[in-house]
Image: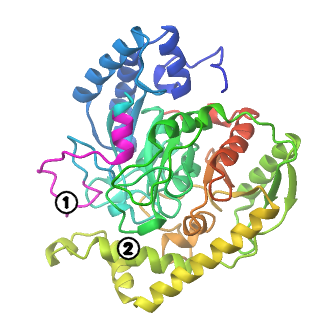
């Protein structure tokens, strides 16, 4: 693990989770101080960003005091005990409403259950500070909804934070907690991670258990959004492992992620695809990503410029995704349907138009893509691409102005293919455009090669300083 830097930010809200834990361990700072700093940042900054559906000081501060007592006695509950953490408002959280960005969900009911990742974090002593925003039912790649409005980008509030985990990414970037739990069904931690300049990781499907089952099926993952790869590993060590409510959950990893991430890249076979063979990429994005790949070469990786060779699988993804949206809304009354995000209502209508044969055809194409990527990774240890072909565009839009894309899938071609294949994929910041907007670099590995993906991303991060840059709110 990287040691705590000598020059840490003055404000605890800007410390990483790894730095906070080291501070707790040495008695330099306390979980109460860190939580107060984060809550203060939320109080000041969320009026602009709208990243939270709720922030709960009355729950967070007592939890922080309990954590402080555990650290004083040398008995922390987990490696992230006392770290302020937010939860995406798609995940059940005991005592807090989970409205999913929808007017169709009644908040005035009992909320007695934690989703698996939330339960693990609570058991591990994380200080849950609040719930973060999502587009309605998490259906698209930007974050706005009929219930809470538009979530904005900390680097430029006129721009989108991305989505669907846009609230969590904006919160992490803005110092409103160093850890956030998001979901990723087509890029939903990586899209906002790229747009907001933070780390977003989608592990191999099943690594982080899910409950309730997603209407989007096995496209949907749960994953961390953090400031550093080390922080991502810290969270993974707490939230991974089977849960009886998730029939597809994988076994607990055999070793902690946080202790396996300093392997040299010498000899690592890296395929660099600048455009997957079919994507139009903004020139400034392309230049920053190409420079980042040069850093990997300087660290000893064997870089080969090569495309993985698949056509855009957008039809298969949209068939599965929009059918999932239709399933998620099938119980609504006519009155509730009238209050849906209008574009979500159109997506549901498209989802209802698919036949069983269409769904099976999409599944077959998905399986073929998985076979193709499996063969590709017999030759290459990792695939590296831009995370996004563009930077954050105007907030309140589903697609960039002037784009010919009908859906959000039209501008996210680097992310959703790897939900189809269930491969681990991470975005890390790799620079800023002339207008000050972040750009992300994506690492993709074969299934079950999560440590390899994290290790390469951390090696790049350790040899750059993009992660230390913070927006000025």
Q: Is residue 432 magenta?
A: no
> Which percent across, then down, holds residue 188?
49, 57
Q: For the N terminus, which image quadrant?
A: top right
> In this rendering, is residue 411 above or below 62?
below
Tell me residue 150's x, y (percent).
36, 54
Residue 472 coordinates in the image, percent (x, y)? 52, 33
Q: Nearer the viewer, residue 180 or 240?
A: 240
Dot 1 falls on a residue whose secondary structure is loop
List x then y, in percent, for residue 418: 60, 64
Residue under pointer 1 = 105
Q: Nearer the viewer, residue 465 or 261?
A: 261
Q: From mark 1 to mark 2, how far is it between C-alphas?
A: 18 Å
Give the label, 1 or 2, closer to the camera: 2
**How many discs appear?**
2
Q: Relative to 143, is 339 on the left or the right?
A: left
Residue 355 visible from this viewpoint: yes
**Between discs 1 and 2, the one toward the N terminus:** 1
> Which residue in the structure is indicated by mark 2?
324
Q: Based on the picture, tell me whether residue 113 belongs to the magenta stretch.
A: yes
Which stretch is magenta? 99-122
Identify the residue shown where x is 36% and y is 47%.
116
**Residue at 63% in and 71% down:** 370
Q: Secondary structure at mark 2?
A: helix
> Is the magenta region chiefly helix, strand or loop?
loop
């Amino acid at each position: 693990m990287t040691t705590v830097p000598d020059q840490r930010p003055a404000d605890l809200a800007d410390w990483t989770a790894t730095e906070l834990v080291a501070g707790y361990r040495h008695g330099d700072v306390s979980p109460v101080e860190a939580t107060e700093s984060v809550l203060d940042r939320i109080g000041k900054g969320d009026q602009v960003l709208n990243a939270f559906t709720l922030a709960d000081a009355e729950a967070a501060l007592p939890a922080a005091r309990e954590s402080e007592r555990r650290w004083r006695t040398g008995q922390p509950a987990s490696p992230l005990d006392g770290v302020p953490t937010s939860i995406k408002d798609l995940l059940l959280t005991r005592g807090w409403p989970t409205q999913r960005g929808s007017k169709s969900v009644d908040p005035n009911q009992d909320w007695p259950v934690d989703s698996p990742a939330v339960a693990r974090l609570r058991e591990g002593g994380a200080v849950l500070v609040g719930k973060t925003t999502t587009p309605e039912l998490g259906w698209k790649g930007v974050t706005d909804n009929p219930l809470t409005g538009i979530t904005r980008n900390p680097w430029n509030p006129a721009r989108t934070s991305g989505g669907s985990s846009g609230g969590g990414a904006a919160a992490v970037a803005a110092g409103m907690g160093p850890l956030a739990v998001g979901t990723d069904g087509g890029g939903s931690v990586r899209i906002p991670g790229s747009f907001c300049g933070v780390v977003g990781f989608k592990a191999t499907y099943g690594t982080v258990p899910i409950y309730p089952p997603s209407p989007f099926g096995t496209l949907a993952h749960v994953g961390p959004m953090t400031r550093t790869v080390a922080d991502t590993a810290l969270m993974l060590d707490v939230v991974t492992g089977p849960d009886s409510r998730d029939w597809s959950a994988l076994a607990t990893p055999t070793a902690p992620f946080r202790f396996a991430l300093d392997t040299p890249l010498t000899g690592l076979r890296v395929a660099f695809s600048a455009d997957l063979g079919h994507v139009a990429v903004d020139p400034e994005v392309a230049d920053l990503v190409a420079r980042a790949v040069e850093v990997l070469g300087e660290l000893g990786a064997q870089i080969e410029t090569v495309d993985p060779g698949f056509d855009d699988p957008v039809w298969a993804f949209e068939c599965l995704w929009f059918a999932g949206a239709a399933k998620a809304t099938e119980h609504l009354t006519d009155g509730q349907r009238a209050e849906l995000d209008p574009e979500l209502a159109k997506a549901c209508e498209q989802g209802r138009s698919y036949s069983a044969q269409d769904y099976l055809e999409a599944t077959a194409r998905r399986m073929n893509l998985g076979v193709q990527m499996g063969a590709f990774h017999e030759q290459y240890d990792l695939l590296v691409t831009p995370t996004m072909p563009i930077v954050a565009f105007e907030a309140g839009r589903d697609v960039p102005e002037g784009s010919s894309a009908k859906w959000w899938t039209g501008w996210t071609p680097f992310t959703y293919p790897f939900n189809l294949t269930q491969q681990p994929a991470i975005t890390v910041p790799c620079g800023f455009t002339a207008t000050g907007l972040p750009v992300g670099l994506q690492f993709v590995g074969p299934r079950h090669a999560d440590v390899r993906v994290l290790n390469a991303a951390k090696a790049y991060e350790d040899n750059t300083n993009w992660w230390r840059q913070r927006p000025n709110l």
